[in-house]
Image: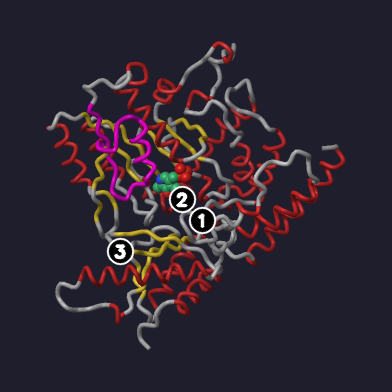
Amino acid sequence: MEAADYEHYLGQTARFMATYRLNIAQYKVRPPLLPKAVYNQLPSGAPEQGESFEALLSDFERIILPNMTHWQHPSFHAYFPANNSAPSILAEMLTAALGAQCMSWETSPAAAELEERMTEWLREACGLPSHWQGVIQDTASSATFCALLAAREQAADIGRTGFGLGQKFVVYASEEAHSSVDKAVRFSGIGTDNLRKIPVDTSNFSMRTDLLEAAIRQDLGAGFRPLWCMATLGTTGSTAMDNVELIGQICRQYGLWLHVDAAYAGNAAILPELRHLFEGLALAQSYVFNPHKWLFTNFDCTLLYVSDKQTLLNAFALTPEYLRTAMDSQVNNYRDWGIQLGRRFRALKLWFVLRYYGLEGLRTRLRVHIDIARYFAALLACSPLGYEIVAPVLLNLVCFRQVPKHLISTDAGDDDKNTAALNAHNAQLLARLNDSGEVFLSHTKLDGKFVLRAVFGQTEVARHHAEKLFALLERLGVNGER
Ligand SMILES: *Cc1c(COP(=O)(O)O)cnc(C)c1O
């Protein structure tokens, strides 16, 4: 592309980006679900001759946009958000312009050193132990996998020797732990049969530490080798908080590596008033959280911290001759801190976000989100239409379901029938909400109950979006009283 054209289309793309942001609330949050709707509009092969940039932009608006789920829409309440912000988007544009590959210090010294600083800034901002060292990875799934591999390599030199018949590692996490732990266990060679899912306390969905200790003792008695335990701060289902302090003491007593998955809730550690939720972290060997979820930083951006960086290096460092440099002893080569060799420049967007908002600006926004969730929970609680809040509202997620009176039988022994009827009813309610295109929520099951999850984490979400969701619920839900 000619320089003048590049500048022209930069302007045009930038204008689209600005308009998209202004008008985002006018889009349907989630498109109609029509499998192959996009695929069938695309030709079966790449064009032989180049096309004009106008054609590309216009097809982007015609084919792609109407079939996107709009993650930055303020009525996106599903999953956990992947919220972004103007400074982050602008940094991503610069990152794309630089097009750097940040595998080693020498391949991009500024990227490596900015990354080092950013991991320190966030460590201090979140009140994490000051000797921890961090690295920016792509996702929490990768980071948890790395933490498990580091623990495995520390315990036995599996990377070199392979698994011998004598290795009977077992690992632990709660029943509410994220599925990335199952994946990590599967691919580390430890095997999902050797992952113990510890039951949770059904009043708050946090791991039963008495049952954790009992499981470890039983495994020891049966000749297994307890290796690693993952505690979750902020489960994906309901933002439940495991008791890291107690779990950490148990891990210490029995010699397990403690990994803490705070993928979502870890962002809330910038709030001093919520620090008590993070007590006991000093007992952990590794810790992960995702600024790409709830810190206005574009996906992907995951922070992995370890209490001893040598454990990561022992598992991952590998220096072929062609990557050896004279600087290696003085710098961080982040390719040695994880699986990927090639790495994106992810620190720049974090730097822009942290400086543009300042920690105080970020705290204010998180507090607004938490406040909206509490407000929404209060709206539900006051409704005559029978809404039940199913888990404690600790942050900005409300787990709820509708319990219409006419669906409930009070006859003894009808509990299962009631649960099935309520689950079917709430699944229908969710489908009606999402098909409206006005809002987008997701669901989970807690203690066998189908519950709707409403997260208030979009950058521009406000109280009136909670009111809009509530009004839709009142319109689309079963009117149990009348
Ligand atoms: C979202 C989430 C993950 C996975 O995050 P990725 O970065 O998408 O891999 C892991 N754990 C918890 C608790 C999560 O909420």
Q: Secondary structure at mark 1?
A: helix
Residue lying at 48% horizontally and 70% vertically, measured from the top left? 433
Where does the image place residue 479, in percent across and percent down from the top left?
Answer: 39, 82
Residue located farthest toward the right when viewing the structure as drawn: 4
Q: Secondary structure at mark 3?
A: strand
Where does the image place residue 287, in percent across and percent down from the top left?
Answer: 40, 38
Q: Quadrant of the C terminus?
A: bottom left
Residue lying at 32% horizontally and 16% vertically, measured from the top left? 161
Residue lying at 64% horizontally and 28% vertically, measured from the top left? 110
Highlighted magenta segment, given as a residue range: 168-194
Q: Tag on residue 481?
A: none
Disc 1, disc 2: CB below 8 Å?
A: yes
Between 141 and 204, which is closer to the camera in this rendering?
141
Pointer 3 residue Cβ closer than 8 Å to ligand 1: no
Residue 178 placement, left or right of 56: left
Amino acid on which disc 3 is placed: Lys
Amino acid on which disc 2 is placed: Ala
**Which mark sits nearer the N-terminus, 1 or 2?**
2
Residue to which mark 1 is pinned: 366
Residue to which mark 3 is pinned: 449
Amino acid on which disc 1 is placed: Leu
Residue located farthest toward the left when viewing the structure as drawn: 221
* Residue 342 lies in quadrant: top right
Where does the image place residue 431, in percent across and percent down from the top left?
Answer: 45, 68
Magenta span contains residue 170: yes
Q: Tag on residue 268?
A: 2
Between 42 and 238, which is closer to the camera in this rendering?
42
**Which mark sits nearer the N-terminus, 1 or 3?**
1
Residue located farthest toward the bottom when viewing the structure as drawn: 482
- What scheme was used to colour the molecule? secondary structure
Magenta span contains residue 413: no
Q: CA distance from mark 1 to mark 2?
A: 7 Å
